[in-house]
Image (cartoon, grey):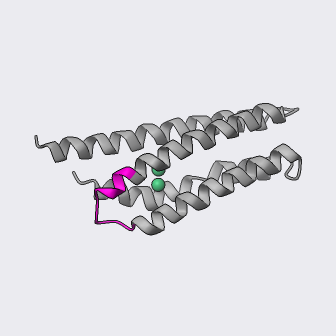
Amino acid sequence: MSANVLDASAARLFIAVDHTTMMEQIDGILRLMAAPEPDVPSICAGLDALAGQTREHFDREGEIMRFLTDQDAEAHRRDHARLLRSLIDFTEAIRSGDKPVSMTTALDLDTWLMFHIQCFDAKLIAACGA
Ligand SMILES: [Fe+2]
Ligand SMILES: [Fe+2]
């Protein structure tokens, strides 16, 4: 097995583990949002932790992208910036009360990362090779 194969396997593993961690964080926040009387400070603490994990994950994917050519790295990086900005804005709106904790806001969070993983990250994982 060559070093490149090992690196590609490690890259795919890092991405998968990060995604699982983020999905678990999102599930935890959605459970808090579904409570009869949602605790906004706890929800915001969860969202802040998610933003921290998201930053680390995007940095890791950025490092992986530097070694790959067969993917749309610029559009991918732009979508990372957009997602992080939208998460920070979402958190501040929940914290300030501008955005109520509701089924609609929970759905926004539930779908926040989904398209990105299915579109950009799927291409990145494919570009890592077999
Ligand atoms: Fe990504
Ligand atoms: Fe990702």
Horizontal side of 81 relative to 72 (left or right) equals right
The secondary structure making up most of the magenta span is loop
Which quarter of the image is occupied by the N terminus? Answer: top left
**In the displayed structure image, the side of residue 74 where residue 23 appears, left or right:** right
Please name the residue shown 65% across and 48% down the image: 110
Q: Is residue 14 left or right of residue 129?
A: right
Position in image of residue 10 (x %, y %)? 29, 40
Residue shown at the point (28%, 53%) measured from the top left: 128
- On the rendered structure, is 37 left or right of 85? right
Where does residue 35 sit, x and y in percent of width and height? 81, 32
- Who is closer to the viewer here, 38 or 14? 14
Q: Residue 82 occupies which quadrant of the picture?
A: bottom right
| Residue 23 or residue 61, whichever sits in front | 61
Which residue is at 42% across, 46% downward?
Answer: 60
Q: Position of residue 105 (x, y in %)?
A: 77, 51
x, y percentage for residue 57?
Answer: 48, 44
Which residue is drawn at the image coordinates 65% and 57% (left, top)? 85
One can see residue 101 in this view: no
Q: Which residues are magenta?
A: 63-72
Tell which residue pokes out farthest to the left in this image: 1
Whether residue 22 is visible: yes
108 or 124: nearer the viewer: 124
**Magenta residue check for 91:** no
Q: How many marks?
A: 0
Q: Is residue 68 above or below residue 103?
A: below
Q: Nearer the viewer, residue 98 or 104?
A: 98
- The relative height of residue 24 versus residue 113 in the rendered view (above or below) is above
